[in-house]
């Protein structure tokens, strides 16, 4: 494959945008080489600036769950654009998508729309603090909840990829209110509650971690968190930015049968436009301005184009009862295929999967938390990433990210992906 055009576009971008990108993981720093500049995408395929066609396994990091340029979403945006793109005033569309989202997601009475997953998580924590009158939160090493200060402490995703899980610029004061525990370790969380019984406003967690590769929760772990929150009067926040409307209509709460107090969304809920949201019970949401004193706002919140895209996406998901099962089966097919090639090659590897999320780590230890994810052999991952790219397969350019499959991927795309691995596996 040739990447001359991407390469020159990257140079031009580096002159005016830090690192040449508007979000660090896109820069390919952990795998090396030149980021691919996209020209357009349709269904399961990306078409880059050099005219290469790639099978896409990131689906815009989640939102393109029904494939790129999904016609009902594109039509909804086009139709809405003619009526004006922003008013800073309420529209009926916001109530319509709120009703549908609340019908699909269990346990929630009210929802507030924002512009990104970062904003949703940041606002959810402020709400938990304001409603509980407590200040500390517990987060898990390797989980990523956006780039707001309180979360950039042992964070996953790009923060690990670039070796700065705890970012400069986050004050000591902020850091001391964020307590850390290893993912899947209930004893560590119990210990934190013993140490700070009256100070913990909330636990925030990705119910299926997707920012250190894909790491499903251990049996009983989320239930254990639920019990601790009930016992100590703390809120359980599920960051469902990745899992919401992806693992099931009702996200991880529905699939795993654990009730959260506050849920945050992003990615799929915007159908590919910038949307985040957070939802909770009537009582918790009553603390939010203008009803209550916890302030949160946004000029572009509930933006009509974004709401139209999100509504069309949720309607499509809600009307297809076979979708989530079908996507889980496709992901299982990929898992089995990759597994058989890697096993035959005798390489150390782990494949984690839940629903339509999956990832490969090149290590002999089971990957259950940040520490074990960090055991992965990054040199081998780089060869894997670039080898697959040469074969026309676009994977996440970091071992600390999950793949997000989309429904446009056919069995033959998946088989082609497995064949690509068979071609390159001897060079890994
Ligand atoms: N933080 C995102 C993945 N976990 C990457 C966002 C992007 O680069 O688009």
Image: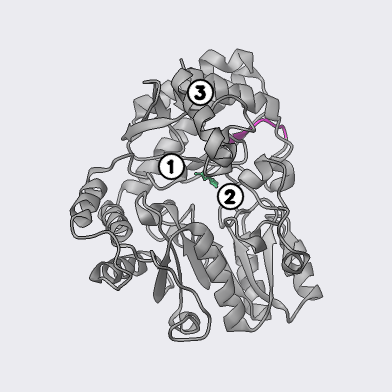
Where is residue 334 shown, x and y percent of the image? 46, 31
Residue count near mark 2 (Cα–Cα under 10 Å), binned few <14, some 14–19, many ≥20: many
Magenta includes 363? yes
Question: Closest to the observer: 89 or 379?
Answer: 89
| Lateral position of residue 151 relative to residue 42, left or right | right
Of circles 3 and 2, the one toward us is 3
| Image coordinates for residue 371, horizontal then vertical, percent | 74, 45
Structural distance between the alpha carbons of marks 3 and 2: 36 Å
Q: CA distance from mark 3 to mark 1?
A: 21 Å
Q: Is 382 in front, or is 252? A: 382
Q: Which residue is mark 2?
A: 216
| Residue of label 1 | 60
Structural crowding at the residue carrying mark 3, measured as other residues with C-alpha within 10 Å and reported as few (<14), some (14–19) or many (≥20): some
Answer above or below: position of 146 versus 407. below
Task: Determine whether the residue tagged by mark 1 lies in a helix, strand or loop.
Answer: helix
Residue that label 3 marks: 7
Residue 352 visible in the picture: no
Q: Colour mode?
A: one colour
Left of 46 or right of it: where is 216? right
Mark 3 or mark 2: name the one nearer the start of the chain: 3
Q: Is mark 1 within 8 Å of ligand 1?
A: yes
Residue 426, by quadrant, is top right
Magenta region, residue range: 360-364
Give the number of the mark in front: 2 or 1.
1
Marks 2 and 1 sit apart, C-alpha to C-alpha, by 21 Å
| Foreground disc of the pair 3, 1 | 3
**Residue 3 x %, y %:** 47, 19
Residue at the (62%, 21%) spot, across then down: 383
| One can see residue 145 in this view | yes
């Amino acid at each position: 494959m040739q990447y001359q055009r991407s390469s020159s576009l990257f140079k031009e971008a580096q002159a005016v945008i830090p690192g040449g990108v508007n979000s660090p993981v896109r820069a390919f720093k952990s795998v090396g080489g030149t980021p691919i500049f996209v020209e357009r995408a349709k269904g399961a395929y990306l078409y880059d600036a050099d005219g290469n066609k790639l099978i896409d396994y990131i689906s815009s990091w989640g939102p393109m769950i029904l494939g790129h340029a999904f016609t009902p979403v594109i039509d909804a945006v086009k139709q809405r654009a003619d009526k004006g793109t922003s008013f800073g005033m309420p529209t009926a569309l916001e109530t319509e998508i709120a009703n549908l989202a609340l019908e699909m997601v269990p346990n929630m009475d009210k929802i507030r729309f924002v512009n990104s997953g970062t904003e949703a998580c940041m606002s959810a924590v402020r709400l938990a603090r304001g409603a509980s009158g407590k200040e500390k939160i517990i987060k898990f090493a390797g989980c990523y909840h956006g780039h707001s200060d309180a979360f950039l402490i042992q964070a996953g995703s790009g923060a690990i990829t670039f070796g700065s899980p705890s970012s400069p610029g986050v004050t000591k004061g902020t850091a001391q209110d964020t307590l850390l525990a290893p993912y899947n370790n209930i004893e560590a969380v119990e210990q934190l509650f013993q140490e700070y019984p009256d100070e913990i406003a909330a636990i925030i967690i990705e119910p299926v971690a997707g920012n250190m590769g894909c790491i499903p929760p251990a049996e009983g772990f989320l239930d254990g968190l639920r019990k601790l929150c009930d016992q100590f009067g703390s809120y359980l926040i599920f960051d469902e930015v990745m899992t919401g409307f992806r693992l099931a209509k009702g996200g991880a709460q529905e699939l795993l049968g654990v009730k959260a107090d506050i849920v945050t969304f992003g990615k799929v809920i915007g159908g590919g436009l910038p949307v985040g949201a957070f939802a909770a019970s009537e009582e918790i949401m009553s603390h939010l301005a203008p009803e209550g004193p916890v302030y949160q706002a946004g000029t572009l919140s509930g933006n009509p184009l974004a709401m139209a895209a999100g509504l069309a996406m949720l309607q499509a998901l809600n009307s297809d009862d076979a979708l989530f099962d079908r996507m889980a089966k496709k992901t299982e097919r990929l898992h089995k295929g990759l597994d058989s090639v890697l096993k035959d090659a005798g390489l150390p590897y782990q494949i984690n999967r839940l629903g339509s999320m999956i990832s490969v780590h090149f290590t002999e230890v089971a990957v259950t938390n940040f520490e074990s994810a960090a055991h992965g052999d990054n040199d081998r991952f780089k060869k894997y990433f670039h080898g697959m790219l040469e074969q026309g397969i676009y994977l996440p350019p970091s071992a600390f990210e999950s793949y997000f499959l989309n429904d446009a991927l056919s069995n033959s795309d998946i088989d082609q992906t497995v064949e690509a691995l068979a071609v390159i596996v001897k060079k890994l």
